[in-house]
Structures are given as C-alpha cells and as structure tokens.
Image (spheres, coloured by chain):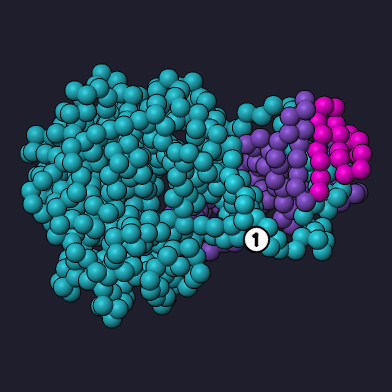
Amino acid sequence: MLKRTLVANRGEIACRILRACREAGIEGVAIHAANDSGTLFTELADIAIQLTGEGLAETYLNQNQILEIAIENGCDSIHPGFGFLSERADFAQAVMDAGLIWVGPSPEAITKMGDKMTARITMKKAGVPVIPGEEVDGGIEEVLAVAPSVGYPLLLKATAGGGGKGMRAVHKEEDLESEAKAAMREALNAFGDDRVYVERLLTGSRHIEIQVLADKYGRTIHLGERECSVQRRHQKVFEESPSVALDAELREAMGEAACAAARAVDYEGAGTVEFLVTPTGDFFFLEMNTRIQVEHPVTEMVTGVDLVREQLRIAGGERMSCGDLNMRGHAIEVRLYAEDPANNFLPAIGQLKRFVAPTGPGVRLDTGVREGDAVTPDYDPMLAKLIVWAPSRNEALQRMGRALDEFVVLGCTTNIRFLRELCDNPDVVDGWTTTDMIERLWPDGWSPEMSGLIADAGLLIATACESTNHGKVRISTGGDMSIASPFSMINRRFP
Amino acid sequence: MEFKTSDGRREIDAHRDGSSFIHEGVIVHTGQELWMEIDGRKHKVTATKIGDVWWVHVLGHTLQYEVIEAGAVSSDDDSGLLAPMPGKILDVLVEVGQTVSAGEALMIMEAMKMEHKIVAGNDGVVETIHYKTGDQVAQGAELLSLSD
C-alpha cells in the first residue's frame, strides 16, 4: 500500500487525486509553481511545496526538481495525473530508478503507445484494427509524398501528440503543405518532436473509447465505453457513457479489443483505448492513453468504480477491487472552458468575480478553481468538468441543462451557453453525435440563440444595476439580528 | 442610459418605481438580491460590475453591458488589429506595403499552447507591423495596422 504520494500536476486533476489519497489514507504532497500559490489543490494536500523557476519547463515539466522534492519529502510514489509528465516514459523510468513507485504503466508500455507509429504497428500485430494510413518517419517531403496514397480528406497528427495539438485536417491538396508546416510547428512546440503521420480522415465517425484497468495479478478488464464525439478543434467538450451507438455485442467486441491492446504491452493501471467507430459499425484503433483521462468521471458514475482509487490500489501492489462490469443509468460530462464560443472558441482570461456552481441530485463538479481566482493564459483554459448522472440518457440531458442554467460565472467568458444549447440540440438529443458535428451544425461559427425577451431583460437588468449602483452599497441588517439562544431552538423539529 | 453590447450600442426605455424597474412585461427588483419578474414568475438574477462592464446572468444566459459615458464617442472604427489575448508571435505572413484582402491571414500567434491566425477584417494595405516573430505580446496590443 502507498503511504505518501506526490501529485505531479495542478488544478482540477491534482484536486481529484489528492482527495482520493485523503480517502485512501495516503498522505498527499502537492507541488506548485509560484503563480499557483494558494489555489485549491495546494490546500487539499498534506504538504505543498513550491517549485522554483518560471514557465512550464522549469516547473511542472521539471523532472529533476520534482523527483528531488519527492525524495526530500519521503514520498514513496508519484502520480502524474494527465498532461504534463504523465506520458513521459523517461520520467516514469527516473521515478522507478530512484526507488519510487510510478502510479501508471511501465515505461515500456508508455513508449510503445506514446509513439503513435509504434502503437499502430503493435496493434496491427495484436490483431486490433487500425485506420488506413501511412506512418511517416521523415520531414515535410515525405508527408507530401505519401499523402496521395492515403487520399483526401486526410488528417495530420503529431507522432508524439495528444490533446488536439499538432493535429490538422486537410481537405484539399493545395492546403497540405501549409497545414503540414503548421502541424509540425505546433507539435514541436507542444512535444519537442515535430514528426507527424498521415491518416485517412473518417468523416461522420464517432469517437468512442474503452476504459481498461489491469493489475499486477494478470487481471485485465474493461469498464465499458465513453463516447466523446462532440469536439471542437479536436478537443472534446461533451462526453457520455454509455454510447447510443453500441449494443451489448459491439461493446463486448470493442472491450475485448481494448483488453487485447492493453495485454499487448503488458499494461498495468488505468488506461483508455480510443477507437473511431464508422456509421456501419466498424471500429478502428486510434490510440491508447496511458494515464487517467479528463473524462474518467462518466465511467465512474455509470460503473460505480472509483478509477483513481483503483490506480492507487494497483500501484501499491494490491488487486483491483471491482467485480464484473455492471453499467447503470447514464452519465454526461461537459468541459467548461474559459473561451469565447461565439468567437471561434478563442481562449479567454479574466477574474472569476462570481463562480457559483450547480448542486442537487446527480450533479458532480470537478474543478480546481474558486470564486475570486484569476484565469490567466499560463495554463490550460479548462475551468471545470460538470458531470451528471440520471437513470436514462434523456433525463441526463435534462439534468445537465438544468445544472448549466444554474451555473453562474461572471468575469471571464466561458462556453457555458454553448454547452447548454448542445443539451437541446436535436442531433445530440437523438444521439447523432459525430466528430465533425460542430463544424457541420455551425459552419460559419456558433452564436447564441437568444430571444428578444432575454436581450431586453439583460438590458433592463444592466440599467437597473447601474441606476442603483448594485452591489456597491451594502445595506446594513441592523441591530436586531442578535444570535438566538440555543435553548429557544431546542424543541424545533424538521418537518 | 446607453450600453455597448456585442451587437452595438443599446438602450432601453425603463420605467422606475422605487427600487423596481419596468419595461413592458418585465420587472427587475433591485436591492441586496436581484430578481426578475415575468408573468408573475420570479427568477433569480446575478449581476456584477467589472470595470465599466456589467456582467449579467439571467435565465442561463451570461451577458455583458459596457456603460458608455454620456457624450462618449465609440472607438470601434479604428483599423488596427489587436492581440485577442497575451501570447507569442509565431509568424508574420505579410510585409509593409503589401495589399491584403479581408479574411487573409496576417500573423500567427500562439496562446495557451494553441495557434491562432490574425486575419484582416477588411481589404487594405499593410501600413505598419509592430512585432516580429518570437515577440511576446500583451492582450489588446496593436499588432499591425492597415490602411483602407
């Protein structure tokens, strides 16, 4: 069992892991850059250590500094979360070489899956279907050379990639060179590796992924699917489980393929195997994410499995605690971003002067921010994940709509209204979610649907607020609000 | 009272009755809490002022209203291109004196690890370029200017 775990991450996912540590009786150590001082995750840790340096390379990506802190503070393990160092095999190896436990799969498994080309080759060998495409090892000339054989539309992807960075869809040959250069530049900046590969773009497909868990005792299981088809700029915004596109038979086939993929690299811990599912029900391996994923809560809600607790358990050498797969009801997650959906989803910054999250039955909020926090351009613009669970998909959509209506964020532009409209969108309601749906539904960009009544009401409210200097003048409650004697309340009953 | 909104300058004809403001069938009650009343149904409203802008949350919508001082002139018509957020210039695609058409990409900048194209809002000639590749820019910085 683990005793003291360093969480090499920040924000929302650091909060998630530190809370799991607290529940498991493991001491949690947070590390944070100077500009993250006093944020929520640093308070959820038993020990919070400030990193020296500025910028990601000197702080959250600084392997040596993080490892030194872990050793100095008597940690026995490091949990990398997602992003940052989570898929760095060299870091996993360094952690293990220092005699600590890496909460994740082996460096070998990370390497095989992290390099998208090697992953394709490994999966082909394991009998898992892969998307038609070409692995490219050289530079721009080779991309241009193989493109005609792959055919258009095609997708350029960073070999070392993830999170939509270094990924470009190319619909016409004349755009190939400029898009390939942009993809390579983005890949170099994001991953320090500018290699890309060329894949056929399967339009109208769904992005469906299978959660897997594997322990050190040879047990490898899948925990059903998550559908993450609704994406903007190849970043997921709306995720759900189960998927309307899967029946028990296809779920079992994909689950088996995912387990085969995991076994092919002797996988340990929690991982996700991503597939594209075509309208005809064929599925192709996209990639395996060798870490906990942003959208893991939807699986937790429908399966009742605490994935982060299982990660800690497996890393500590215990058997996973969950039994056979038993999916129940429907869960949806939306990602709240500080961005302007009406302006091409451009990231936004500002101070969260008001941040009032929804509550009530079946509502879960995973966030790392609080009212008053500043949203800066230093980090990822994701503010929170709002997750709902309900007995059926329809009720889950209604619950998500209700929760989003309650969500008040003032001071920083967010995509809340965009997410709210998705909940009522006929394609979403009918389950016609595909990876190209945002471009298909809003080819000229999204703008909010707003009735004249709302526009007038907003203007009237602004007029009323400005006229009365709302919020500036605090009305005194007077002197007769003295604390009531507890004895006067002794016989009160709840109805 | 006039406000700048995403669809231009707007004002509304409001009738004031004590701490309540009325326009057609909509009533806004002010005080420590804000309430809106439509057809006898009350809805909680949240509003806060940040700088000159009122941020309003009403019925699931978040709206912004910038207070315009009486007699002020709108500055929307300047032809400069401003950085939409702080970031780094990755590439300058045009030269001074070059003729560009609306929608043409002028610069590429990186912010929050994503690339963004700065595009010309109208046809024109590049007059000045204020930054070069690799420069860090602040939000709202004028990147380049176009003449008509």
Q: Is residue A66 above or below residue B45?
A: below
Is residue B29 magenta-colored? yes
Question: What secondary structure is marked by label 1?
Answer: helix
B9 vs A251, nearest the viewer: A251
Which chain appears purple? Answer: B
Chain identifier, colour cyan: A
Q: Quadrant of the N terminus of chain A?
A: bottom left
Q: Amino acid at mark 1?
A: Phe
Q: Which stretch appears magenta? A: B13-31
Q: Position of residue A12 (x, y in %)?
A: 43, 55
How many marks can you see?
1
Percent position of residue B142, x then y: 65, 56
| Residue found 24% across the figure and 54% down from its top | A311
Horizontal side, residue A270 vs residue A384: left or right: left
**Percent from the top left, x then y, of residue A286?**
24, 38
Residue at image point 29% right, 60% down = A24
Read off the chain for label 1: A
Inspect this view and state whether residue A413 appears.
no
At label 1, counting other C-alpha atoms closer than 10 Å, the crowd grade (few under 14, some 14-19, many 20 or more) is: few
Identify the residue at horizontal 77%, vertical 60% (top origin).
A481
Tell me if residue A136 comes above or below residue A171 in the rendering. below
Is residue A125 in view from this perspective?
A: yes
